[in-house]
Amino acid sequence: MQDQAAPRYLTVLSDYLCATNLEDLPAEVIDRARWLIADCLPLIAAGMQAEPMRDFAKRQLASDPKGEASVIGYGRRTSPNVAALLNGTAGTWLEMVEENIYAKGLPAIQIVPAALAMAEHYRASGRDLLLAFILGYEASCRISRATKTKLAIHPSGTFGVIGAAVAAGKLARLDRDAMRELINVSATLGLATSRKAIIDGATVGRAYSGASGYLGILTLELIQSGFTGETDGVHTVYGSIYADTPDVISKIPQAPKQSFEPDMVIADLGSDFLITQGFIKMHACARSIHPALDLIEEVMARRPGGRIDPQEVESIDFQAYFSPTTLHNKTPKTAFGSKFSLPFAVASLIYHGRAALTNFDENAFANPVIRDLALRVDITENPEYTAFFPYKQPCDVKVRLKDGTVIEARAEHTKGDPKSPRGPAELRNKFFDVARLVWNKEHAQRIFDGVMSCEKIDDVHAFFSKHPI
């Protein structure tokens, strides 16, 4: 591809990706990257213990593909693309991975598995791993932010392919022309993902993130083999195939005015970082449910003993922006599907009295008290709240008890949002709460300490050989 034929935004982006070093990045960006990598590792390891994941891994590894990339939580190494596929799929199983509402999806779990697998493959340093992850995150999230994505599409398996490819390409030290070619090719390799699959609780949605890593590494292999892409494959796919102009998105302030706005991709590039604007989950359910759970925690805290008796509840009514209203199903069909039911999540939180992984297990799903309470939980859209999204995520609740008591609460920002951030202690506690499902405390501590001082790791492969994940 000749420079004069390349769109300016892709040239600027690829030049930036190739020229940027870790020391060029703000300290808060690097710190956030450490936390996101740390957040992903135990989630992947724990998710790998699910029976369908164990069987899937066994099938993928049956031909014994050789390689140096860790299959996290499985005790095997394999080729980078298979490791990225398995780790990315397992990482979403508990539904607690980071999300970025500006990018409209789950960036970290689509990119970390590919970046880590390729870092192990190349025996790269921790500094190189951090840099590759950050740049893959920024490139892909900026492209997704510049797009009016169709609401029918689930964004995992789409923009994440670009992020995984950029991370792999940075570790392979591609030059700017190859990097631009890689972005164009990766843009055309995403999946036709269905948001309804997620809402229905279909577990095929778990594979979307794994596919991003797999296809991102495939993109690098294609580029290294001499394959080429369109002059502007990004615009083709993100301006027409993945994009339209639904009413809900058209109401968002500062959203793209067209289906795809190239200038948004490079706006404030190098000074404004989307990686600092993500959201790390503390509840094991869809991100759009979290505002409602925050309010229920506030309501419970006001009650004697910090609890609400489910039998005392007459009704619970929420008003929120559009996205939570799509998760209104009161009778999920599976325990996994209960992670995508706002009424069930609220009822289970009230029943258990605290956020926990057990709120969405088989026992909770079968609990008649929880299922009955879920029938008394309603949510409606407030169009004025939708107009504020994603810069605010307004939600309010009115809890009516059978004795006539009415308890109300409202919040404009979800806990964990950059404007209402979680502290390091909460993030650390989450790491160890999940890690204890698969690792002993001492081993988890060594992994955590290593990742949180990632720049000191000379060889990622050697580090995880000494401290297996």
Image (spheres, rainbow, N blue to C red):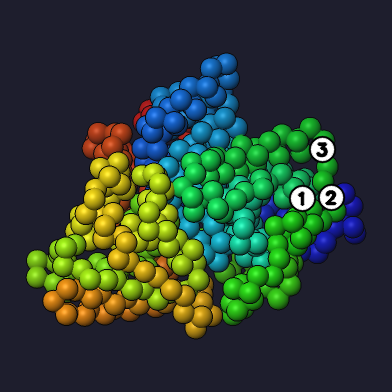
For marks 3 and 1, the one nearer the N-term is 1
Mark 1 lies on residue = 184
Q: Secondary structure at mark 1?
A: helix
Left or right position of 189 against 428 = right
- Estimate how packed mark 1 is, as few (under 14), some (14 to 19) or many (20 or more) residues with alpha carbons within 10 Å: many
Mark 2 lies on residue = 230
- Mark 3 to mark 2 CA distance (whole Å): 11 Å
Left or right position of 226 against 57 = right
Q: Secondary structure at mark 3?
A: loop
Q: Are marks 3 and 2 in contact (CB under 8 Å)?
A: no
Closest to the observer, 300 or 85 = 300
Q: Is residue 419 above or below residue 221?
A: below
Q: As drawn, which residue projects farthest toward the bottom?
A: 384
Q: Position of residue 213 (x, y in %)?
A: 59, 41
Residue for point 57% across, 44% down? 208
- The amino acid marked with disc number 2 is Glu
For marks 1 and 2, the one nearer the N-term is 1
Q: Determine which quarter of the picture holds residue 174.
A: top right
